[in-house]
Amino acid sequence: MDQNEQEDKAAEATEVKTEPAKAATSGPPSLSELLGQAQNAYAVYMQAQREVANGYKKQEQIMSRAFARSDKQAADACEKTVERAAKDREKAEQQASEAYSKAIAAAQESYATAVGEALDTRRKATNEAWSERTEATDQAWVIFQGEST
């Protein structure tokens, strides 16, 4: 019930309770009539005050439920965002791990290729040097023995 309805009710109750007293007497109201009117007015006031308090309580309950709904929605949204962030992090970590593994494999392959090429070059150079040494030694023996080629 809104405040205007409460004021209307209070005014009607006051009018209903005070009108019979006015109709019964044509002169000034007696002290007992005035006291009765004051008691009636106070009773109406107290009823209106209770209704206003009830209105405030209802409003507080409505606001509490609205807050609880809003808080739950925020908590749900936060939880979903955290879950999504965790999945994104896990995916990024897995991609980084895969990239790291590929980089390690590529580095090992590159190392193996470079070492293989270096060993092959060394073997060829050693063979060539051995061949040159052998040829030079053979020529030296030929010259030493006095033979000509």
Image (cartoon, grey):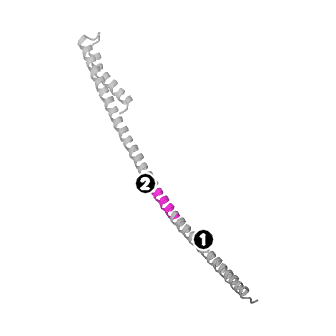
Question: Does 13 sit above or below residue 129?
Answer: above
How crowded pointer 1 is (Cα within 10 Å; few <14, some 14-19, many 20+) is rated as few
Q: Is the magenta stretch mostly helix, strand or loop?
A: helix
Of all residues, the one furthest to the right in this rendering is 148
Residue 113 painted magenta: no
The residue under label 1 is which amino acid type? Ala
- Relative depth, front residue between 145 and 63: 145
Instruction: Residue at 33% x, 25% y: name it.
Output: 10
Task: Say what amino acid the circle numbered 2 marks.
Answer: Glu
Q: Residues within 10 Å of mark 2 (few under 14, many from 20)?
A: few
Q: Nearer the viewer, mark 2 or mark 1?
A: 1
Q: Quadrant of residue 46?
A: top left
Q: Residue furthest left?
A: 32
Which residue occupies the foreground of this view, 132 or 97?
132
In the image shown, does 9 or 26 lie closer to the viewer? Answer: 9
Q: What residue is pinned by disc 1?
A: 114
Q: Are marks 2 and 1 in contact (CB under 8 Å)?
A: no
Which label was assigned to residue 83? 2
Residue at image point 41% right, 50% down: 79
Residues in magenta, as a range: 86-99
Residue that appears at 32% across and 33% down: 57
Residue 67 lies, in percent from the top left, at: 38, 40
Q: Position of residue 142 (x, y in %)?
A: 72, 87
Residue 107 falls left or right of residue 87: right
Res 50 → quadrant = top left
- Whether 92 is among the magenta residues is yes
At 69% from the left and 81% from the top, the residue drawn is 132
**Residue sitting farthest toward the front:** 145
Horizontal and vertical percent position of residue 120: 61, 77
